[in-house]
């Protein structure tokens, strides 16, 4: 599915800058290394990744990452969806469910969704899930081969004062 959606997802996908601080080429981890990292991060409560399913078909993924406890108690939500299931409410439902999990089970105070300004579909997801535009972030993430500007949508936990 990821291979079939490569062109659809490429403009929005995080990439790794070509060179690290030593001037060496960066390499993406293998699939198994990525899964090990995701599992380790989940065990430590720093990141949670979930598959999005429709019937028996994997149609996407949603993650809560950068989870910080203490005085901030927040995290970032990211997601992707198969183009055949886009604009059908699945991503919005996944964001709503993950938000509920983050607020009730993890007692987080604040969640962010950072997206590229031209990503209208993702902007609609954030709005429909009750997130509010907070502002702009210049050159925030390395996406599709370059540092890209983002806009930040935020939702605060109404049960935490």
Image: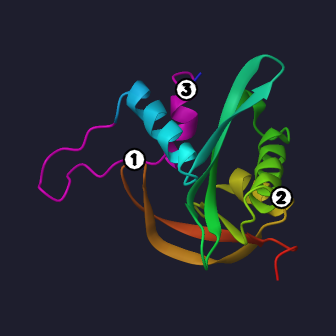
Residue 118 seen in the figure: no
For residue 118, side relative to residue 57 (left or right): left
Give the spatial CA distance, label 1 vs label 3. Answer: 15 Å
Q: Height in image: 137 above or below 31?
A: below
Which residue position holds label 2? Answer: 129
Give the quadrant of residue 8.
Answer: top right
**Disc nearer the start of the sequence (1/2):** 1
For residue 112, side relative to residue 30 (left or right): right
* Count of numbered labels shown in the rendering: 3
Give the spatial CA distance, label 1 vs label 2. Answer: 26 Å
> In which quadrant will I find the C terminus?
bottom right
Q: Height in image: 140 above or below 52?
A: below
Question: Which circle marks residue 2 in the picture?
Answer: 3
Q: Is residue 27 magenta?
A: yes
Q: Height in image: 90 above or below 71?
A: above
Residue 131, position as x, y percentages in the image = 78, 67
- Residue ID at (61%, 46%): 48
Give the spatial CA distance, label 3 vs label 2. Answer: 25 Å
Question: Which circle marks residue 15 in the picture?
Answer: 1
Where disc 3 sits, the SS reads: loop
- Residue ID at (63%, 70%): 152
Residue 123, position as x, y percentages in the image = 72, 59
Residue 118, position as x, y percentages in the image = 61, 59
Residue 45 seen in the figure: yes
């Amino acid at each position: 599915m990821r291979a079939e959606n490569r062109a659809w997802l490429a403009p929005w996908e995080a990439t790794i800058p070509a060179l690290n601080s030593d001037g060496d080429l960066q390499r993406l981890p293998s699939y198994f290394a990525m899964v090990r990292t995701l599992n380790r991060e989940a065990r430590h409560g720093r990141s949670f990744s979930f598959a999005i399913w429709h019937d028996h078909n994997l149609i996407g993924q949603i993650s809560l990452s950068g989870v910080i406890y203490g005085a901030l108690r927040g995290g970032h939500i990211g997601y992707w969806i198969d183009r055949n299931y886009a604009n059908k409410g699945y991503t919005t439902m996944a964001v709503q469910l993950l938000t509920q999990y983050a607020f009730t089970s993890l007692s987080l105070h604040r969640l962010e969704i950072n997206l590229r300004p031209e990503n209208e579909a993702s902007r609609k997801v954030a709005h429909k899930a009750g997130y509010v535009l907070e502002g702009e972030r210049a050159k925030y993430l390395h996406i599709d081969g370059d540092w890209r500007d983002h806009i930040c949508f935020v939702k605060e936990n109404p049960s935490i004062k």
